[in-house]
Image (spheres, coloured by chain):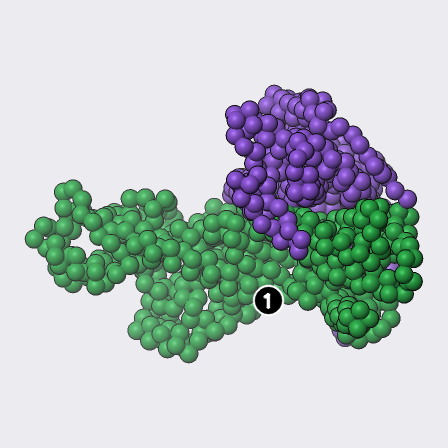
Chain colours: A purple, B green
Amino acid sequence: MEFFRDANIDFLGKKWYFLAFSLIFSVAGILSMAFWHGIPLGVDFRGGTLVYVKYAHTPDPGAIHGELERAGLKNARVQRYGPTTNNEVLVALDIQETSEQALDRGKTQIIQALAKDTPAGKQDLNNSSSLAIANYLLEKDPLRVAADANPRYTAMAQAIVDYRDKQKGGVLNSIDELKAVADPAAVAALQDGFFASDFGVRSVEIVGPQVGKQLRNQALLATVYSLGGMLIYLALRFEWIYGVAAVLTAFHDTLITVGAFSLMNKEISLTVIAAILTLVGYSNNDTIVVFDRIRENIKLLRRERLADIVNRSINQTLSRTILTAGLTFLTVLALFLFGGEVLHGFSLALVIGILIGTYSSIAIAAPILVAYQDWRSERGKRPIAMPVRTGNGQDRPKAKAKA
Amino acid sequence: MTKSLGWKLAIIVGILVLFVFGIFGIPKDWSGPGLLASVGDRIHLGLDLKGGTHLILQVQVNDAVNVDSDNAIARLKEDLRAKKINYAEITKPDPVNHPDLIVIKGVPPEQTSDFKSIISDRLPEYNPSSGAENSWTISMKPQSLADLKNRAVAQAIETIRNRIDQLGVSEPVIQEHGLGEYQILVQLPGVDDPGRVKEIMQSTAMLEIKQSLGGPYPSEQAALQEHGGVLPPDAVLMSGKSVGSTRDTEGGQSWYLISRASAVTGRDLRTAEPSRDENGQPAVRFTLSGEGGRKFYSFTSAHVGDNLAVVLDNKVREVAVIKEAIRDTGVINGRFTAQETQDLSMTLRSGALPASIKYLEERTVGPSLGADSIRSGVKAAIYGMLAVLIFMLVYYRWAGVNADLALILNLIILLGFMGYFGAVLTLPGIAGVILTVGMGVDSNVLIFERIREELRNGKTPPSAVEQGFSHAWITIVDTHVTTIVSAAILFIFGTGPVRGFATTLVFGLAANLFTAVFVSRAIFDWVLSRKQRGEALSI
């Protein structure tokens, strides 16, 4: 089986179309960043409080918002999280309501507001730690165990919490359900001191202003270092213009990916930045494959125009460019489809980035090389010297005079 | 050829055994759950998969600097008095932003050299500089200041570790968080309700036993009036709950005049235990160390009949009359609950924090979310991997089998690496494993496509394989280096989940250099060695 055998497409002839395509997407992204959604930063960079709450039934964000408002949290945002069948909502407070003096106050207020129906003197089983349950059982001692009460009740509390979290997704509908894992006498005792609310807190993220700022700087620095590292490595391995072309291409990919997040108003979290940095490295892979072939062909076909050599090189490597990107795309798609809500932004960035990265290694990187060459010859200079690979695979910079 | 093939096979089998051992170790039990448990011992799950709490806190190092400069002022005053050097006043102009700055006004010009020699002899960490109208500004030398701050962070880490160890949290991470200033990263697996742990970590627990010189007074003004508006130089006013008020009635504040010097401090403690006082109320009983006991004995025997104050975090917890010389035990009671006495005795045993701490970041993952994440991560990994393996089989036929074997070995080496290094697997880390599959197979594609090209150009299968590997090798190194560079930068800048991602990606791609090139080549050599001359290659 083989795709793209003997492909012969004039890629460089279409460079204006490519340029137009890239410009449209870049400019749309930049406009959205500047005037529309801005760069939608996630809680990691912006700071703030996020509480993920799972309900036993389909939640009504409007009603939850009302409850929070009555509790004095006027600016809380409530939105559905993940697929509707998950019964999950995300409650968010801005950085203004998150201070380092009392970092978790917002979280406590949210949980208190949601738990307003708690019967007097009872604890909520869906939001109790196994320690609290074990302490309660130890105090009541429903099984009348004399010896080793502590390890027995601790194990029982752990089993209850495991059942709640791993079998029931974190929320029990009623305490009766516990009969599957605990002794009936213990369940009866729990019913005296506990009740089952209709929600459970799945996870909490609180980022204070200082860390938010710190993470912003670090993400920016990491991206710059990554691009810089690429430039240096490729400039050493190839001619410097190859490094510049590859880094410009990677920058183009980053810009369009971030722009896409802005256009879709998807939040950029720490893991999205991780995906983007990976793309900076990965989108260079296809570029390097093409560059390697250009370098090889320059040696073989000295008399041809650079544009023809580049075109031929792209065509010769087209099948492997598409295959390698396609296979990586398959795995990324599996992540996007099955990886769950936590990885959603991360895999979305990879899906967009790999598509753009493959396109740009053909449509952006190679034309930059040719454009630079044309610009030099217009100014009457000799063409740039290309390092040439000798038979044993070593690189030897060819003297400029010979070229 | 066959001889070198034998060597290659031996190397491959050796590596396979080495890394399978890396994953499993030597399991105690060879059943399914037993194997799983032994993998769990070697490859640890991150907080996002296991559930737990991640905290970043900052040591308020200026507190420690303030303590140091307060001590410096006390020493300076003593020495100036001893040397009979006059001064108008000593102040700290900016204790919040520049806690090391001390200003002395009105030092007579003729005593300048005496003054300077006191500073250089007695306060060697400080630099004096003269200002207008006989005033001097003393500030800490930059090196000493930095040392002091770093020491405070190190000591805080030590104290917090002691406290968390006593809480029985398994496998906690407590380390300096290098990405910020004076920050500490704390990870507590399995703790999904961090409230109590946070309070215990935060309590300064600075215990001092001092002489009480007067009180209780109903307010600060009342206390000042009592002493004619001027406090004795070696005493301070401290507040505390009045006797008889319970922990629920707020506002029952009293003021006491307490000596600056301490008879003993928390450092002199040997141990502290929850206990009951004479009225049966929860209290904390402490025992002093040998040295502390001697100090306390000489102090109490000299002050029989005087009042003694137990001061915790600059609040008076108890005032009692010294009835007789006490050697080494005492009781702190101050209307505690039983839980509070437990926590307080624990924090006292673990030592005082050198400075207060502030929480900057808190992330909690409940176990239900962790379990869901494992499920979806593993599902995505299996589907992604199957898609790649099947595609390679369909597209490259027998060579696809070669690539698939190399890929599976790639994964074994990746997981084995993680086992050897005790690396942490996070949800993005699982994504890194999936990406390793997708990116690792790229190497095989590059090689195979090159071999096909060489075959099309009329090369024989052995020479096409030879050419294919040698040409693709350089390209593969280049592509791997660029990806590993970005992943390494991620590792340096990331924490937690993101770092787990960088780890699997770096290990996975490094292993891929071996499997996609060396292993795959050996399999080709083996296939070729069994073929007749001129027989076609299935690729």
Residue A270, given in percent of the width and then of the height, sits at 64, 42
Quadrant of the rendering where the N terminus of chain A is positioned:
top right
Residue B524, given in percent of the width and then of the height, sits at 83, 60
Query: Residue under mark 1: which chain is it in?
Result: B
Q: Is residue A402 left or right of residue B182?
A: right
**Snapshot quadrant of residue A323:** top right
Q: Tag 1's secondary structure?
A: helix
Q: Is residue B290 left or right of residue B121?
A: right
What is the tally of numbered marks visible in this picture? 1
Q: Nearer the viewer, residue A388 or A38?
A: A388
Residue found 69% across the figure and 39% down from its top: A301
**Amino acid on which disc 1 is placed:** Gln
Residue found 23% across the figure and 63% down from its top: B122
In this view of the protein, can residue A302 be seen by the observer? yes
Taking B277 as reference, is A132 above or below it?
A: above
Residue B313, given in percent of the width and then of the height, sits at 44, 57
**Snapshot quadrant of residue A288:** top right
Residue found 14% across the figure and 42% down from its top: B133
Q: Nearer the viewer, residue A267 or B210?
A: A267
Q: Is residue A246 left or right of residue B456?
A: left
Q: Nearer the viewer, residue A151 or B490?
A: B490
Quadrant of the rendering where the C terminus of chain A is positioned:
top right
Q: Where does label 1 land, which residue?
A: B166
In this view of the protein, can residue A287 be seen by the observer? no
Mark 1 nearby-residue class (10 Å; few <14, some 14–19, many ≥20): some
Residue found 52% across the figure and 40% down from its top: A401
Residue A187, given in percent of the width and then of the height, sits at 84, 57
